[in-house]
Image (cartoon, helix red, strand yellow):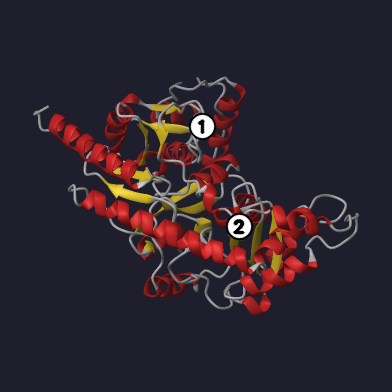
């Protein structure tokens, strides 16, 4: 008997295993009893135990290893964006904007201070609200939308999921996926479902499969998807809208993180009349990651639920920050600087693509701060060889959501800060590393 596992239904059995894991009775690596044995002990149908184990696996709590049994997974940290602070290597996987391209807020700071804000006042500063209303005017159903200000896009997504879902609810995520989205969903106790993406963004078949698996929310990046750089085409957005029109209560979150820097048009996947939706735009990519502010345009019901945790007397986004963002965003010089930054990122990435293709590496231009490069061999092996040459690169394995049958062959590179000399050196080192890994697999090196 396995006294710590009880229950008569799949849900009850899964809950008891979860409790045993959380209490330490079942430590990482522990093997769960075989399905047939546990079914006999509990007096339930074998399929009931199969369903319980499947639910635990989808939640990331256990992993099935065939004849090796079903084991409790080891807790691991989700990879994060940003610099590797303890590395002496040149980091080309940060995902950061160029600090030299972030507008200087000094001139706008003093006027932003103004008078103090007291309890009971509106949570959105009037000036910012007026500007943001125009900024978000291309949101689907804009005529019936309401604005919410949060402390960045991740904060907005976390609150949007929390107001609509309960623990173990399924959330459809793009695969490959933005690291923060993976972290937010798993930390919130939701069940991630991978939605396949291609060069035109989220696929229709992938979304249809996620809905069939019970997704109650999806997070879609309409342009400059991280890490792939893919942007939705008008045709793909139309197809996704047509599918979503049959599911009006599925929460659709659009994370338009690159917005003002993007070189591609915005195509929403939210159908007209959809009941639960939100468009999120942050300022972090063009005003800097430390400028933790995002604007959310959503349906009135969703906005009302979001506002429950953003009310006077409890918490709100600093009005000093709101006024500073507003002052910057109505400054023509800042807009010119953002336009220059957009040109810079696009030009530097395009130049690096040409460097790689001239060396036989399959690379294509996309939108966003990063490049998503197909090296044709296990990317993790390439990163090891690059480390020996002084580079810290990021393999695509970190971004893969669904179980992979083979290691990722993608590198996500942030190269826009490299000068021509360093860019040439990195491109050459990548080509050499790929050739070395390919030689090993062919039994040459």
Figure quadrant of the C terminus: top left
| Residue appearing at x 58%, y 66% in the figure | 335
Q: Residue 309, can we see it?
A: no
The image position of residue 423, as x and y in percent, is: 32, 44
Mark 2 or 1, which is nearer the eye? Answer: 2
| Residue appearing at x 58%, y 73% in the figure | 139
Residue 311 relative to residue 193: left or right: right
Task: For label 2, count other residues whose C-alpha is less than 10 Å away and answer few (under 14), some (14-19) or many (20+).
Answer: many
Residue under label 2: 283
Q: Earlier in the sequence, mark 2 or mark 1?
A: 1
Between residue 286 and residue 68, name the one nearer to us: 286
| Residue appearing at x 68%, y 51% in the figure | 151
Residue under label 1: 77
Q: Quadrant of residue 22?
A: top right
Between residue 374 and residue 428, name the one nearer to us: 428
Q: Secondary structure at mark 1?
A: loop
Q: Quadrant of residue 31?
A: top left
The image position of residue 64, as x and y in percent, is: 38, 32
Task: For label 1, count other residues whose C-alpha is less than 10 Å away and answer few (under 14), some (14-19) or many (20+).
Answer: few
The image position of residue 126, as x and y in percent, is: 79, 68
């Amino acid at each position: 008997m396995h006294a710590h596992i009880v229950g008569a239904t799949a849900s009850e059995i899964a809950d008891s295993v979860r409790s045993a894991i959380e209490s330490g009775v079942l430590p990482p690596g522990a093997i769960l009893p075989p399905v047939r044995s546990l079914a006999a002990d509990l007096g339930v149908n074998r399929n009931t135990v199969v369903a319980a184990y499947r639910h635990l696996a989808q939640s990331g709590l256990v992993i099935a290893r065939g004849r090796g049994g079903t084991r409790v997974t080891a807790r691991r940290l989700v990879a994060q964006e940003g610099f590797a602070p303890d590395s002496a290597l040149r980091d080309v996987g940060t995902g950061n904007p160029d600090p030299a391209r972030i507008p200087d807020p000094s001139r706008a700071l003093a006027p932003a201070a103004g008078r103090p804000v007291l309890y009971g006042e509106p949570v959105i500063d009037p000036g910012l609200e007026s500007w943001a209303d125009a900024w978000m005017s291309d949101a689907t159903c804009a005529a019936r939308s309401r604005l919410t200000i949060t402390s960045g896009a991740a904060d907005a997504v976390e609150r949007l999921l929390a107001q609509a879902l309960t623990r173990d609810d399924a959330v459809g995520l793009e695969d490959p996926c933005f690291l923060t989205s993976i972290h937010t969903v798993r930390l919130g106790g939701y069940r991630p479902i991978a939605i396949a993406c291609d060069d035109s963004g989220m696929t229709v078949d992938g979304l249809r499969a996620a809905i069939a698996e019970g997704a109650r929310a999806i997070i879609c990046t309409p342009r400059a998807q991280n890490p792939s750089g893919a942007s939705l085409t008008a045709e793909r957005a139309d197809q996704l809208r047509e599918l979503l029109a049959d599911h009006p209560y599925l929460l659709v979150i659009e994370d338009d993180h690159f917005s003002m820097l993007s070189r591609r048009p915005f195509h929403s996947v939210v159908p007209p009349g959809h009941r639960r939706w939100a468009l999120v735009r942050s300022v972090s990519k063009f005003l800097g990651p430390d400028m933790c502010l995002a604007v959310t345009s959503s349906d009135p019901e969703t906005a009302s639920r979001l506002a429950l945790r953003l009310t006077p007397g409890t918490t709100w986004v600093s009005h000093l920050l709101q006024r500073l963002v507003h002052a910057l965003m109505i400054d023509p010089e800042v807009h010119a600087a953002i336009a220059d930054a957009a040109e810079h990122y696009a030009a530097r990435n395009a130049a690096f693509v040409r460097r790689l293709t001239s060396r036989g590496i399959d690379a294509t231009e996309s939108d966003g701060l990063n490049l998503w490069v197909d090296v044709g061999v296990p990317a993790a092996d390439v990163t090891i060889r690059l480390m020996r040459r002084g580079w810290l690169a990021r393999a695509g394995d970190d971004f893969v959501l669904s179980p992979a049958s083979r290691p990722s062959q993608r590198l996500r590179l942030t190269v826009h800060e490299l000068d021509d000399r360093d860019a040439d050196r990195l491109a050459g080192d990548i080509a050499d590393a790929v050739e070395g890994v390919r030689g090993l697999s062919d039994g040459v090196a």
